[in-house]
Amino acid sequence: MPATDARARWEALLRQKRPVLLDGAMGTMIHARGVSFEVCFDALSLERPELILDIHRRYVAAGAQILLTNTFGANRYRLAEHGLEDRVAAINRAAVALARQAVAESGREVLVAGDVGPLGVPLAPFGLVQPHEARAAFREQIQALNAAGVDLFVIETMTDLHEAREALLAAREVNPDLPVVVSVTFTRDDRTLLGDTPAQVARALREWGADVIGANCSGGPAQLLRVLRAMRQAVPEAVLWVKPNAGWPEQVSTGRVLYPAGPAYFAEYAAAYARAGARFVGGCCGTTEAHIHAMRVTLEHLPADLQPEDVRVQVLGPAASPREAVARQARAGEATGEATGEAAAADAPPSRLAQRLAQGRFVFAVEISPPRGVNLRKVLAGARLVAQAGADVVDITDSPLARMRMSPWAVCQRIEDEVGIETTLHFPTRGRNLLRVQGDLLAAHALGIRNLFVVLGDPTAIGDYPEAMDHYDVVPSGLIKLVKRNFNQGTDYAGNSLGEPTHFFVGAALNLTPADPEREWRVMRRKIRAGADFFLTQPVYDPDAARAFLAGYEARYGPLTVPVLVGLLPLYNLRHARFLHHEVPGIRLPETLLWRMERAGAEGRAEGVRIAIELAQRIRPWASGLYIMPPFRRYDMAASIIAALQ
């Protein structure tokens, strides 16, 4: 198609009142059809053309107005990984032909965009590939796409602005008449991999002459709504493009990769993106034709005269429930609190735990203790087991019972890297002065840890080294306040700048069956005022008493707006049950449970699992999740409980 015709059709799309609907994921759809990630997806345009054609047809039928070609990795560097570096032109031409065929069969006005992804190798000064070499590689691919007749170029999922610039310049050199979209991906911190903010990205891309700027992939719809608003605020006149992932990916036991955000959730965000000023909306990893269809239905029902919101002002009222309280943080990036009038980290990206609580999912957290030595094999195996069973997050303790163990930071990082499940770092204040507290927080954030569970910690007198220093400068509520009102705002305790804000999601301890409810209510309220995002509780064996405790709090202070993950410690045998009942402060077992464990005899472990499942079923209607503490590192017990409750 002549460039002038493509430009005319492009401008016609820009004139339509509602946002232009894009397609969804290509790789997700390919993988769902049984194709291994080891296969070169780009080469499938030559090797399995009917598969690619079918995916395009589905997106056209769902309502997509622009199709991206199956060429995300069709550059010589990525193709070289499969020995296909000499097939750049052939693969790109075939991909364009398949998209064109799907459009022709539909009889609809759909544009075909030549998809250009990163080279897959770092550019200087962080790698060996020089800028002119990168531009040459991009030019080679873009020339093939242009010769095959694309309507526009989409340079997407860029993590390095320097690389994005080389791709943009290559596109301009090949065909200055075709529109060019440049879309960047962001880490959980709402920055690129090299640290650029959405505002910096938007200004740079606009200055370099991109027709459309935007964001894709990243963490999911909520994060990219924040990014979109930041870009528009920085460059109000920009034409904006957004294609989020369907949340954070999870790998299940079958080896498949699943994404949590469904079509209905994307439909909500289609409207939100339109109000935030997006002109192009679609989906990235994890999305399917169902997501695109749901977005189309939403967009068709938007008012034709819809005006973009003022991104300078985001007004949020008080939350009415734990789900809404966390949803507001996850979706708008504002911290929750109880009538404090202070928001923390207005652009804080949510952790996956925050996202799931925001979506109203019942969350399963499992406690894991670090090893005494250097061997992490058992810990990693336990994390894999509970992850496969359906746990949402694992909580890593810090020197439980004041006994020497490996640093939980290392355990968190290894589990997240090797297992893929998110972690929560237990962060005791005991044994840390104010300097160490702040340095440790920065270190945890640098390691990618976003969930914190703030506790006082066990006194050293009961542990391996009773003579060890036991002092502390800050109590848990004070540390919560320090994190939420200082660190998440970008300053330390003294008000000095950290350079950028941290993005912690902070939990606090709670006893639902205390000996002195009045005192516990006061402590609980103090933690909420400090900014606690969620509670993890001590083990509960009397759900009715625990629910009554929360009802008592609400009677005095109003609705509880912070999610509560209720502690569940399965009983291992009668001896374990009697120890908890008689020797652990704050735990009392009903006589019926002690009797059941005595009657179970050698089958105590199985009976303990049955009791835990029964307790969980009574807790589930009023709690936001379970915090399971496997006894004696028996992670199989936690896995059995989660599997039974799924």
Image (tube, grey):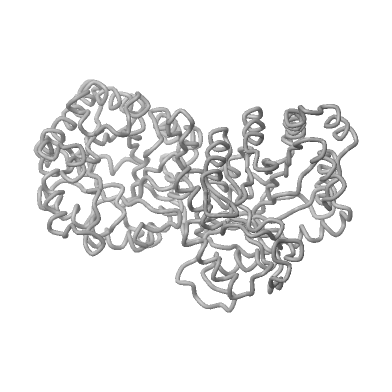
Along the line of sight, the residue nearer the viewer: 200 or 429:
429
**Residue occupying the far right of the picture:** 591
Query: Is residue 274 at least partly visible in the picture?
Result: yes
Q: Is residue 261 left or right of residue 134?
A: right
Identity of the residue drawn at 86% across and 35% down:
594
Number of marks in the image? Answer: 0
Q: Is residue 602 above or below residue 7?
A: above
The one of 353 and 367 positioned closer to us in this rendering: 367
The image shows residue 32 at horizontal and vertical percentages of: 37, 27
Q: Quadrant of the C terminus?
A: top right
What quarter of the picture does the N terminus occupy? top left
User: Which residue is rendered at x = 37% and y = 43% of the image?
Assistant: 243
Say whether residue 339 is visible: no
**Residue in front for this viewpoint, 270 or 16:** 270
| Residue 122, x across and y down, in percent | 25, 55
Instruction: Residue 418 in the image: state x and y as whole percent.
Output: 45, 45
Image x and y of residue 377, in percent: 51, 45
Q: Is residue 63 left or right of residue 40?
A: right
Image point (11%, 52%), residue name? 136
Residue 461: quadrant of the picture = bottom right
Residue 617 sits in quarter: top right
Q: Quadrant of residue 12?
A: top left
